[in-house]
Structures are given as structure tokens and as C-alpha cells.
Image: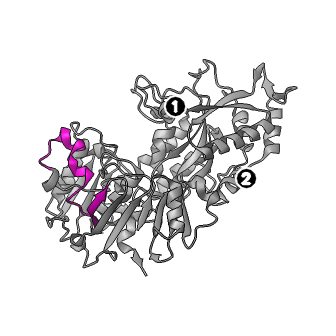
Amino acid sequence: MVGDWESPTNFSPLFNEEVPAAQVDALLYGGLVKLDNNLQPMADLVERVPTLQNGDVSWNRAAGTMEVSYRLRSGLRWSDGQPITSDDVAFTWGLIVNPKVQGVLSPEGYQSISRVDIHDAQRFTLHFDRVYAKYLNLFPAILPKHRLGGIAPEKLGGDPFWARPDVVSGPFKISEMVPDDHITLIRNDAWSQGRSGRRPHLDSIVYRLYPESGQLVDAARAGQVSVALELPDDQLATLASTGSATTQVRSQLAYEQVTFNQADPNPLTGRPPLWKDDPALLQALRMAVDRPGMVKKFFKGQAQLAESPIPRALTSFHDPNVSLSYDLGGAIRLLDGDGWVVGPDGIRSKKGQRLSFHLVSALGSPLRNAIRDQMIADWHKLGAEVIPTDAHPSELFSGYAEGGLLERGQFETGLWTWSIGPDPDGVYPLEHSSQIPTDENQGLGSNFGRFSSPDLDRNLDRGRSTLVLVERAKAYAAFERAYAHLGFELPLFARVLVVLASPHVHNLLPNPAPDTTLWNAADWWVD
């Protein structure tokens, strides 16, 4: 019995990014390559992971193009017995890039594929018209052409298939659904075809739904569920008693952070930001926040400090010398030397400007409110007046056309979570100057802090323009150094993936990647 506290609405890896839907999708769909719990690529539907080293990836560096060749496992079958072939891969790609198919989550990357050459039922080659270093993240789910090919592209997103997929390629398939209560999945025996007789150990998985996370935790304590998925990390401090269940914790590919808006003039105030041409102020504001104390207080020390937007789990892409220490005394000395004078009320000013600004965050998260209040108290010790403001998530995160506060830059500082995914190039939309939402680019990009730095841009461009791991590692380490020097953001900590599990469940390996904790459910067994 697996428990979750949110109810999925449909099971479409193309159109639905709900976390509970992704959990079930991991049981239903196979992809070309998936990531293990250490974020290392492993072959799924294909015989091996394509790389430069094994010759399956070729790269014309001068032209900036690349080709990736795959071979599907021999004998793969859909759950209805039909063969899984190269045609299914080409069909999936065609749907994703078809403008008539509305609502696709992200065609980015797929649009860089100029064509798919099918050599035979097992072998095919993807031709990219640019270097796309994240190629292994593409095609996490392949769709059945023989089942979906007859549906008009413009009607695909709303087709009943996604409510209960009846042709799947994963280790399990749906046998029963009771909305908002449970989903029963049984072993997909066809999954073993092409896998040398390997089959899921479990006969079935019951995916039980609870209306809220507290009830799920109670069910895990009582032994009513064997695995409680994706518990909110703000409950870590309260999980002292879990009965016989054990708590498993992993850092997510997401980090909580503060963004200091660099727009000049600031769209909210109409004035230059306080920190314009004042790097000492930014560094002092960063140094004055007691991040280690925050992690100890709110996460029982089980969250990792974040030093940059690139998650620590991506160990190959870090400069080990980049770090941020809590140093209130050092921060005070920085501001003293920078001309920020403490006034009678304890708040600093410089050249007639008071060190006072607003910090916006989304309504609805007690944890985030507590973190915000802690930072405000820390900054007050420095001599800064920080005024909290709340915004409804829909108001804060709406798109550019809808007037979203972040998209439009209508804030001075903001507190929220960023998630970049399992490749460091996920930083590009957040930090590159070309990704600042504007009227000219119709709101493209997520550089809400309006950062514009040649150093950041150059290293992000370098990181995405090569397939050589050593070159990519150097580029992102240089990005981290420039990021730390500029101080446009304050990374706080990595968000935490929390799972409760019965000691009777074996091979459970929580996974921070998009493949979810159920990524290896075929290998689970119960004593």
C-alpha cells in the first residue's frame, strides 16, 4: 500500500505536471533513459545509454549540430502485446512539436530535433540542429502510436485515454480506480518482454489517496500504508514519532532562495534599487542571514545549505571553494565601510536613502512565513528594515500576459523556491539575461530578478554549447564563482524530499529526479 496526500487528475506525462500524477506515470510509462536515485542515467527501453564515449553520440562542433543514435531492447511489448518500435518514438516526438497539440508541458529540446531517422524497428537516430547537452532528459515516456495515432492532434490533450491509460509500457497497469480514494495497479507481464525475463516482484500496488498530509502521516504511523510519499518538508520538525515507519530524506533538485530585483527603475517603486552599484550591500545582506540556524531550527538539521542554484546532488558541476558563511559581524563592518550609517531607530541610511525594502512571498505556507520572519529579524540586527508582503500564488506566479508580479518584476525582493531539474543547464532560464521577461520577447524566460551579467551569460552559454563533461564542469564552476561575487540572489537551502516507509519494504530508494520515488518500484519486494 502506497499513500499520497494529493489526488491526480490524469496520467499524461505530456500535459500534466502534478506530482502525484508523475508518481503513477512512473509505473505506467517507460522512457528511453531514466535517472537512478543518484541521478545517473540508466537504460530503460533502450539497450544502452548513448554517449560520446561509446560512439552513439556524434557532434559537429564547427556546425554546432549533433546526432544521437539509439537501439531499443529486442522484444519490447506494450501491455496489449503490440511491439514497441522506433515508430512509437517518432510518433511521440511528432506530437510534442506539433503546434496543433495544445498544452504540451515543455517542447524545449524536442524543437531542437530537426528530424528522426528510423533505420528499423529497433534503431533510430535523432538529428539536432544545435548542441543540446540535456539530450538524455528527453523522452521520459514513449506513447503508443497504434493506440493514439487515430486521435486528432487538437483533441489529444482532452482525450479520455489519459484518465485511465489502457495501453502502457511500464511495470504496472491500472486495474481499478476509485476517484479521490485509491488506484489499484497490477503487474504488467508484457513489461518483462525484452528484459531477459525480469519481472516486477510485486503482484500489485494500491495507491491510496488521503485528503491531507497529516492523515497520511497518521496512516503511516498506524501501519495502514507501507510507503507515504512526498511529505511536505515543513513537517520534518514534527516527525519525531513515526511508529515502525522509518523516515527517508533526500535533497530535492529545488532550492529556497531570495531574489534581489535588479531592474532599474524597479517597476514597483519607480526608483533604482537600493543595491544598484552597491555590491557591498548585497553581500552584507547575504552574510547577515543565519542559514545554518535556519536549517537546524526548521529541518532538524536535515536540509542542506544551498550555495548556488545548481543542486549539490549534481556534484560534477560545483566549485568546492564557493561557499557563503554566516557572519553578522563581517556584514556590519561591510556596511560601516560602505557608508551606511545607523540612525536613531537602528535603521541605516546612505546619502539620504533609508535601508528599507519589501519582501514578498506567497500566501499559504507556514514554513515559508517562519523563514521570512527569521530573515527579517536577522536583517534588523544588521540595521535593515524589511517589510513583509503576501501575495496569492496566482497573483505572484501568473504569466507575463496575466500581469504576474514576478514575471513583471513588480517586487523589490522575493522569497520562493526554484527547481532546475537534473541538469545544470536548468539554470539558464533563471539567470541568463536573454531570459528576462519583456514585451519584446512576449514574457519568455524566468529571470524574474532581471539579472544582466556578461560573466553569468558567458559561462551559461559555455555550459550548454559543449558535450564534453570536463568543459561543462569548468563552465558551471565559473558560473558559480561569478554568481557568488555578484550576490543577486541569496540561496538558502535545498528543499527536502521526505518519505516514510515500512521496514518490510525493500529496495525503496527515494529519487529527487523527475522519475519520482516510484522509479524502481519493479525492484521493490516485501518480506
Q: Looking at the rendering, which quadrant does residue 108 occupy?
A: top left
Please tell me which residue is depicted at 23% across the width and 36% down the height of the picture: 99
Which element carries disc 1, helix, strand or loop? loop
| Residue 506 in sight | yes
- The residue under the point 84% across, 30% down is 346
| Marks 2/1: CA–CA distance | 28 Å
Q: Secondary structure at mark 2?
A: helix
Give the mark nearer the N terminus: 2 vs 1: 2
Residue 492 drawn at (x, y percent): 63, 47
Which x, y percent locates residue 368?
61, 44
Residue 31 visible, this angle: no
* Quadrant of residue 376 within the rendered picture: top right
Residue positioned 63% across, 44% down in the render? 484
The residue singled out by tag 2 in the image is 293
Residue nearer the viewer, 523 or 525:
525
Marking on residue 183: none
Could you tell me the amino acid type at mark 2?
A: Gly
Q: Is residue 205 above or below residue 87?
A: below
Q: Quadrant of the N terminus?
A: bottom left
Colour logic:
one colour
How many marks do you count on the picture? 2
Question: 10 Å neighbourhood of mark 1: few (<14), some, or many (≥20)?
Answer: many
**244 w.r.t. 312: above or below:** below
Q: In this figure, which residue is indicated by the disc labeled 1?
A: 406
Residue stretch in magenta:
149-178
